[in-house]
Every structure is written in C-alpha cells, then in structure tokens.
Image (cartoon, rainbow, N blue to C red):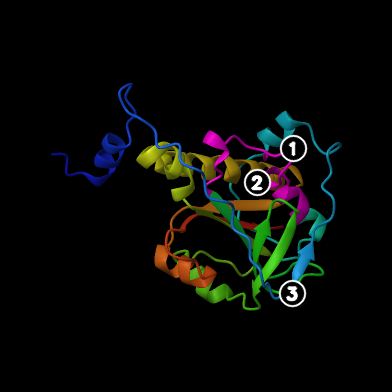
Amino acid sequence: MEKHPGKLFYRLSRLSPEDELPLRRKPKAKVYANPLETQALPPFRQDGGPPLFRALSHLKPLLPQVGSALSLKDLSQILYPLAEREGGRGFPSAGEAYPLEAYLVTFRVEGVFPGVYHYFPKEHQLFQLSARAEALAWSQALLDLPLDKAAALLVFTLVPERSEALFGIRGYRYALLEVGYATGLAFLAAVGQGLAAYPAETFYDEAVARLLGLPEGEYPGVVLVLGR
C-alpha cells in the first residue's frame, strides 16, 4: 500500500475505463446574503491595452514597490477573467463546476473601505464580509512576506466538493488545476496594466482560513499580492 500522501492522492484519483463517475447535481456557487456593504465594480475594458505577447514578455512575480493605492478600475480588470459571461467564465472548468471562490483583502484601494470582500462573479461585484484588513496578521500568515506596500490581496480558495459531485475524488485534481488557471489569468491582467503582482503559494493554511472566515470544506489555494 502506497504510504506517500502525494503519490497516494494521484493513485486514488486516477480514472480508468471501468470507473463510473458520480455525475451528481453540482452545488451552486457561494452567495453571501447579508454583506456589510456591496461594492459594484466599473465595467471591464474589453479592448485596448497592451498586446498579449507584450504583456507575456513582462510577466514575472514582483512584490509592490511603490505603496500607492489601486483604483476600482484596476481591480475590475484584474477580476474580469473570473466574471461570468454567457453562462461561463474566462477559464475552463470540468463540468462547469467552478470549484473555487475569490476574496479580496483591501488595504489601499481608492473609494473602497479596507476589509475583506467576497467576489460575486455573476454580477461582477464585491460583498464586504469584514471591516478588518490586518496587514500584520496576513504577513505572518504568509511566512512574514512583506506587505507594507501592498494595496490588496486576491485570495483564491478551493471548494473541491463541487467537482467531486461530478467526478468523484478526481474532482480534487480539477479544483487545484482551476485555481491555477484563475490565478494565472488574474496575474496576467494585473501585469498587463503595469501593476505589480506576486503569487504567494506558501502560507499557514489555518491562519489564512481564519482571516477569511472560511467554512469547513473550503480551503486556501493561492494569495495574489497586488499593488504598484
């Protein structure tokens, strides 16, 4: 019996021709019924901006250097790949389960109170969940990553049960893949606007979950540090 947890995960989530997929009804995306505030985002720009290959040539992880604020237009473009359009979103999802959520922790964003927000992709809106944006606590959760010049954190979480309902334990693979898709697109959207973005994949899971107030079954995936 395989004892290595990583190898065991891949063995248990393999798909064979004789396997029957659950294909149950997939759970719905999360909606917060009573947010502290609702912040509408400006319409995202669908043309203009730098050509794709020019943006790709500048693509590298970079922590914010200046410490100035982001605008709502900046955030709208960064979140654009996550927004619903024609029933889908800007990245592929096996069975359209979309086993991820996105949260924004704002420190310095023009016209937005500091705090923790949940991104609602159907309406391209932010729902405020908390008025506390604890930069020191977040820095400690990210293994003392310096956040003194960060304007915001975009935190992706995984909800693997959505994919598991359709594909069994293999759905956990899809959740990890799709958080990668979403993070890469948000990273590209930030750098394409000339912003600094740094994907932090190493963190204390329980600390991040506590700062976001995550329920059981929802797990931190990637924290994208944003700024100038």
Tell us which disc is closer to us: 3 or 1. Answer: 1
Q: Position of residue 137 (x, y in %)?
A: 51, 75
Q: Which residue is mark 3?
A: 113
Q: CA distance from mark 3 to mark 1?
A: 31 Å
**For this rendering, which residue is in front, 48 or 37?**
37
Disc 3 secondary structure class: loop
Asked if one can make out residue 177 in the rendered structure from this viewpoint, the answer is yes
Structural crowding at the residue carrying mark 1, measured as other residues with C-alpha within 10 Å and reported as few (<14), some (14–19) or many (≥20):
few
Lower position in the chain sequence, tag 3 or tag 1: 1
Q: Please identify the quarter of the rendering in which residue 149 is found.
A: bottom right
How many numbered marks, from 0 up?
3
Q: Please identify the quarter of the rendering in which residue 96 is found.
A: top right
Which residues are the magenta region? Answer: 75-99
Disc 2 secondary structure class: helix
Lower position in the chain sequence, tag 3 or tag 2: 3
Q: Position of residue 71 (x, y in %)?
A: 80, 61
Residue at 70% x, 76% y is 36
Q: Is residue 121 left or right of residue 182?
A: right
Q: Which residue is mark 2?
A: 186
Lower position in the chain sequence, tag 1 or tag 2: 1
Which amino acid type is shown beneath numbered disc 1? Glu
Q: Quadrant of the N terminus?
A: top left
Tell us which disc is closer to us: 1 or 2. Answer: 1
Q: Is residue 69 left or right of residue 212?
A: right
**For this rendering, which residue is in front, 97 or 127?**
97
14 is higher (above) or lower (below) than 148: above
Which amino acid type is shown beneath numbered disc 3? Phe
Is 89 inside the magenta-drawn segment?
Answer: yes
**For this rendering, which residue is in front, 19 or 153?**
19
Residue at 55% x, 66% y is 146
Q: Is residue 104 left or right of residue 125?
A: left
Q: CA distance from mark 1 to mark 2?
A: 20 Å
